[in-house]
Amino acid sequence: MTTLAPRSSRAMLNKVPEVTVYFWVIKILCTTVGESFADYINETLGFGLVNTTLVFSVALVAVLVVQFRLKQYVPAVYWLAVVLISVVGTLLTDNLTDATGVPLWVSSLVFAVALAVVFGIWYARERTLSIHSIVTTPREAFYWLTVLVTFALGTAVGDWTLELTGWSAGVSVLLPLGLIAAVFAAWKLGAGPVLCFWLAYILTRPLGANIGDFLASARDEGGAGLGTLGTSVLFLGTILAVVVYLSVTHKDRTERAAIRSEQAATVGDRQA
């Protein structure tokens, strides 16, 4: 997809990481934390659904303010925003389901329509949905709004699927994993990279949530018995380790990828 020149006067370096294996690993870890940490604060510590939502929403707004003020991708800030947005996205669906009694199929439909609307407005204004072009404030706003809605949608669809199937925590991992494999195969066969990216992004939400449920569930329920706190600590520690590694090596910076491509093209021209 051709990326048009930004219409905003405030141009920046790309504000999101290169889509590498590190990206997907941290994304899945973040979705697991979104499920387990929200449950721990809400249920185990007894904060309640409304208070938990308020606390994490305030924290998310504060981190996004910092994120928007930056002019380039900073791993620590970016991934902290993703962790918090995963929690808030989970809580949005939980509030609709548990607090107001909205059926999961209705929540799934509402968030699917909301995502389509956001994509439609984003494309109509910017003529691209590529994450490789997040170089202006409006595009970054569309990006984060899309991420929030995908987390809420993934939570609703994932919970609805479990409600319909009655699968155990372990078995439930297989469906989103299989769908992600199908999206990957479609991409390899030539399907649109932007469409495949966002489909995979949505599907990693139920995958991470189901992994979190499996690890946190008691052994007699078919889980690993780590509990919500143990699962949260394990995954937050892993996220921190990977983010520190990326901060030091810069392996997920799009500027590095662009430089490598330019160098490869230069070598090719010389050989020709």
Image: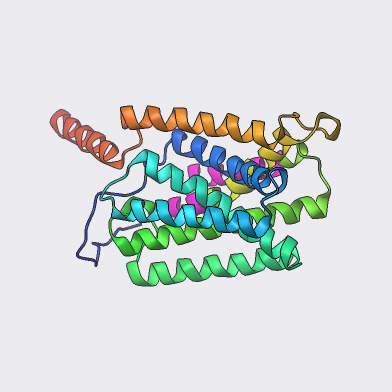
Please state which of residues 271 and 217 is positioned toward the viewer in this rendering.
Answer: 217
In this view, which residue lies farthest toward the left? 270
Q: Please say if 142 is above or below 84.
A: below
Q: How many numbered badges does the structure rendering display? A: 0
Q: Residue 233: horizontal and vertical position, in percent?
A: 59, 32
Where residue 61 sits, quadrant-wise, is: bottom left
Q: Is residue 195 magenta?
A: yes
Q: Residue 196: horizontal and vertical position, in percent?
A: 50, 51
Please state which of residues 30 and 175 is positioned toward the viewer in this rendering.
Answer: 30
Tell me if 182 is positioned left or right of 66 in this view.
Answer: right
Residue 153 seen anywhere in this rendered image of the structure = no
Q: Residue 70: horizontal and vertical position, in percent?
A: 28, 50
Task: Name which residue lies at 51% across and 49% down.
Answer: 84
Residue 202 seen anywhere in this rendered image of the structure = yes
Q: Is residue 54 magenta?
A: no
Tell me if 261 is positioned left or right of 148 in this view.
Answer: left
Q: Residue 39: horizontal and vertical position, in percent?
A: 68, 46
Tell me if 8 is positioned left or right of 241 in this view.
Answer: left
Q: Which residues are magenta?
A: 173-198
Where residue 154 sits, quadrant-wise, is: bottom right
Please state which of residues 193 and 199 is positioned toward the viewer in this rendering.
Answer: 199
Q: How is the image coloured?
A: rainbow
Q: Please say if 198 is above or below 213.
A: below
Task: Specify the quadrant that holds the C terminus.
Answer: top left
Where residue 11 sits, quadrant-wise, is: bottom left
Task: Name which residue lies at 77% across and 32% down.
Answer: 223
Task: Specify the quadrant that holds the N terminus.
Answer: bottom left
Majority secondary structure of the magenta segment?
Answer: helix
Q: Please say if 232 is above or below 158.
A: above
Task: Name which residue lies at 60% across and 65% down.
Answer: 111
Please state which of residues 176 and 83 is positioned toward the viewer in this rendering.
Answer: 83
